[in-house]
Every structure is written in C-alpha cells, then in structure tokens.
Amino acid sequence: MASSSSSKPATPLSTSAEHLNSSVCVIKIAEGKSRGVYASRPITRNTTIEISPVLFFSKEEYENHGKYTVLDHYAFKWADGRMALALGLGSLFNHSDTPNVSFTLDSTTDSIRYTTVSDVNTGDELQIFYGHKLWFSPVDEMQHITIDTRIEDGWGGLSAVIEDTESDCEGPFLDGNPDEIIPDEDLPFTRFKLPPEEEEPGSIRTVQAWVVDIPDPRHITTMLKWLKKNGLETPDLGHLKRIRKHGDTTTFLLTTAPDPPSLPEELNLPQPVQTPVPNSSALTQPSLHLKSALWPTVYTPRRKGESEGWSRGKVRWAWQAMKTTVEAAINARRDGELPIAAHIPPPYESLVDLNQRAFTACDTRRSTNHPLRHAAINAIRCMADYRASADLLRRASPSKSMGPESSFDSARDESQNGTNYLLTSRTFFITHEPCIMCSMALLHSRVKEVVYLYPMTKTGGCGGSACLPTLNGVNHRFGICTWNEEKAPVVRDVPHIDPTIDV
Ligand SMILES: C[S@@+](CC[C@H](N)C(=O)[O-])C[C@H]1O[C@@H](n2cnc3c(N)ncnc32)[C@H](O)[C@@H]1O
C-alpha cells in the first residue's frame, strides 16, 4: 500500500497494556509510532500470534474513496486487487526493516495470519515489514533500505499478494499477434495423450443409476421440479439426457446414489430400478451410438487426436499464471510450508469480465498439522468457500451487486446448491503433479485442464503413478499438460520436493 491520504493514524491510547489477544499480545503506546503490538510473555519462533479476519473494499471503492481516508494507512492489498482492512490486532503491527513477525494473506479464510520469525522476549514490540515504499519516516531505523519506486508492493508485496508488475512487459510470448495460434511443438508445455475414446461395445464404461418409468407424461414436469428441489440435479449426470423414450414407455433418470430415492407419493410411480448408464459423454459417432443404446447420451464431438489450439495471448496468460503459482510456492516455503502451490485464474476467454477472480492456495499440511491440506484441495476449497459466502451475502441482500464473480453467481439460482466446487472451463495451475487424492478432487470438480511444472512419478495422479482421467468408472476427462521450463522459464528457486511426497 502506498499512502496518498493526508489523514493521520488514530490518536494514541491514554492507557497501556489493556488489549490482550489469545496469544497474550498487548497493545501499548509505541514511541513515535502511536500504538503498537507487544509481547507480554516470551514467544518462540514460528508461533502464530494472531489471525485477523479482514473487511474488503473493492478496488473501485478504495480508489474513489478509501485511499483519501485514514484507511490508507491500514489496508492490505489482496491478491485480486481488493483492499483488506485487518480486524483484531492485525491493523496495529508497526513496520520494521528487521521484522520479528511475518504475515500471510489467506484467501481460504479471508484472514491474515501473523507468525513470529524469531524468538521474542517479554516486552518486545512485534513488527512486520510493510514493503520498500513507505509513506512515513520510520523511527528507530539506523538506515532505511533504498526505495525502488518502481516497486508498488505495499503491505502485501512480500507476502501472499502476487502482483508482478514486471511480468506485464517482460517474458516470452509477448510480441506478436495475441490471436495467432502457436504450433503445438512451440508450446511451452507438453500435453499428456489420453487413450482414444471407446468405440467397442465391451469397452464402454458404465455406472449404475436409479431410473423410474413415468406412465403419465404429464408428470415429467413435476418430476423435473422434484429433482431440482431434492438436489438431485447433480453435475455427475450432465453427460446424459434425463428422459428415455422406448415405444410408449418414458423412463426418467434419477441418481447414481447407492440407495433409491423416495419418490413423490402423490404421483403413484412404480419402484425405481437400477440400470447401467455410460459414465461419460460421447466423443465420436460410433461411441454415441453404443452409449445411447444404454441411455441417451450427450454428444461432445472432438476429432480424434485434435486438441484445442492455443493462441499467443493464451500462452502468455498461462505463463503468467504459472509464474504466480511458483511465487505462491516460494512464499509458502518462506512461511515454513512445503513449497507447493496451486492457482486458478479466470479463464483466458473471460479476462475482460473483471468480476471473475483468481484463487491461489498453498499446501498447509505443516502449519495446520493436517495431512490432507494439499494445495489443490485448498485451492478448490478456497474457491468454493468464496462462492458459498457470495451466495449467503446475495441471499441476505439480493439487491446488492456481489462484486467478484457476480456474473457467475447471478447465473445460478439457489436450487443449484452443491456446485460451488465446480471448475468447469477453468485451467488449474499447480507447481507439482497432484497426487491421486487431489487428481480425483479435480476430476470431481470437472476441471478443464491441469498444468503442472514438476512431474511426481511416484505419487502423481495425472500420469505419474496413475492417470485418473483414464481410469474405468470415472465420468469426466480433463487435459493434462507438463510445463516446459526451458521454453518459458518461470522458476526462480522452488526446489524439487521429496519424490515420495503426495502433492
Ligand atoms: C497500520 S498503522 C500501525 C498502527 C499505528 N501505529 C496506530 O497506532 O494506529 C500504520 C501507521 O503506523 C505508523 N508507523 C508504523 N510503523 C512505524 C515506524 N516504524 N515508524 C514510525 N511510524 C510507524 C505510521 O504512521 C503508519 O501510517
């Protein structure tokens, strides 16, 4: 943050050591800096001393109003350009060139986590590093770091905020027509070749689904409404048509859940029965023919061996996304986590939609002491939580614009609960090939493609030890690309991790 407001921070407290948080940090008067946060007991290195929830301001709100107020001394720049005011003690940490506390912006929980980076004694002031571009003269600094005014890093500049101004004007795939399609051999990634679509009767992959005959066609509308109301309109059956007509019989597809659903009593329908249905759409005409003999299937044609063309602009977008992912992994390592990160940018095709937002998350299994907090799962969760909270807010105040992703949100209605985790049409960037668990989560989320930098041959689920989209029984396929570091360098110093780790 660079301050442009002439307002001053709040007036000093008249008392000291009154405000305690659960880590026993206290607010005291800090000579020449107004208030500051102090340790009221010894605190060891790597201790989380505060988690502050944040209050967001949209970029426009901040540009037009916020920055002309005292907020300009307090707000953190979030990764997506919004400004965040830390509640709790978060706004009161003063700046030091030699900080004893680091902070991480956590988009998963919309909070800022403060952690000690050295042992702290009772009475020490707890200070963070605001960035290289300060708007005040710091007290107690012997010498101040030379300011590079090109760096607008603000408070978030050293932390989870990933804002690489350099990348806008440097790097590969910059010059030339952004719409020009780049030949496959020049792309900075290698595509994993999935086996061809099944076109033999015995190789069609199926799943058991509950279906019911509907003797009276007038009941179909009622059934469609009932399906929605009961949350059975799930995306796992999106590749199938809902109704099958066979002579005079109309059969209705219900669910792939293990147990039969209880149907509306007033319709007097027969008992549902189970039948095998194809577990994916048909990519070719022969396959459509075979699959539709089991159950009417959606045709999503793609010529054999044909893959989507990547324009120069899209490759550039992917390079920036991959860089962002790597930066997040470097930050994670600095914070004591495994250097693994995932990033979900808005689709290239929708970049003009300023409401679409990106989600970035790192592996947090160390800090949370939770073995399943992998980067991929965290990123999906981060996006789903964000959408869920947007839904809640929308319901609470339907007339208000919901800001980021509002176009996504307004396209949905409340009956579509349970779709917040969907990554349909999204490309998922991750530093390391995701493990089998995460690859399955990505498959469930209907991701369009996964791009990773480091293959994990022992543990990966995207071509390493297994390739989830090619397994029998799965109902979605996604593209897999391995980034070619030599063609489009993104790595600064993310180390290869232990090859036996599940990413
Ligand atoms: C986020 S606030 C920190 C809390 C603030 N001290 C207060 O009492 O509200 C940032 C403001 O604190 C002051 N500040 C922070 N670090 C400082 C330092 N090292 N030297 C002097 N003033 C500092 C500056 O006025 C800055 O605008």
Image (cartoon, rainbow, N blue to C red):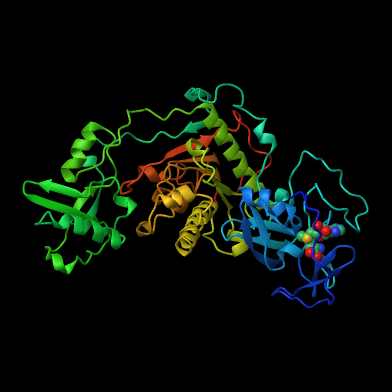
Q: Position of residue 269 (x, y in %)?
A: 12, 63
Rendered residue at 23%/46% (across/down): 241
Residue at horizontal 84%, vertical 77%? 15
Residue that extends furthest to the right in the rendered view of this protein? 142
Q: In this rendering, does residue 118 appear at all?
A: no
Of 484 and 354, nearer the camera is 354
Expressed as whole percent of the image width and height from the top left, the position of residue 407 reads: 46, 47
Residue situated in front as seen by the camera: 336 or 17:
17
Q: Is residue 408 visible?
A: yes
| Quadrant assignment for ligand 1 | bottom right
Is 464 placed left or right of 132 in the picture?
A: left
From the viewer's perspective, tell me whether residue 156 is left or right of residue 456: right
Nearer to us in this view, 120 or 248: 248
Q: Is residue 362 above or below residue 116?
A: above
When asked about the image quadrant of residue 14, the answer is: bottom right
Q: How many marks?
A: 0
Q: Is residue 318 above or below residue 99?
A: above
Compared to residue 79, the image places residue 35 above or below, namely below
Which residue is rendered at x = 55% and y = 63% of the image? 370
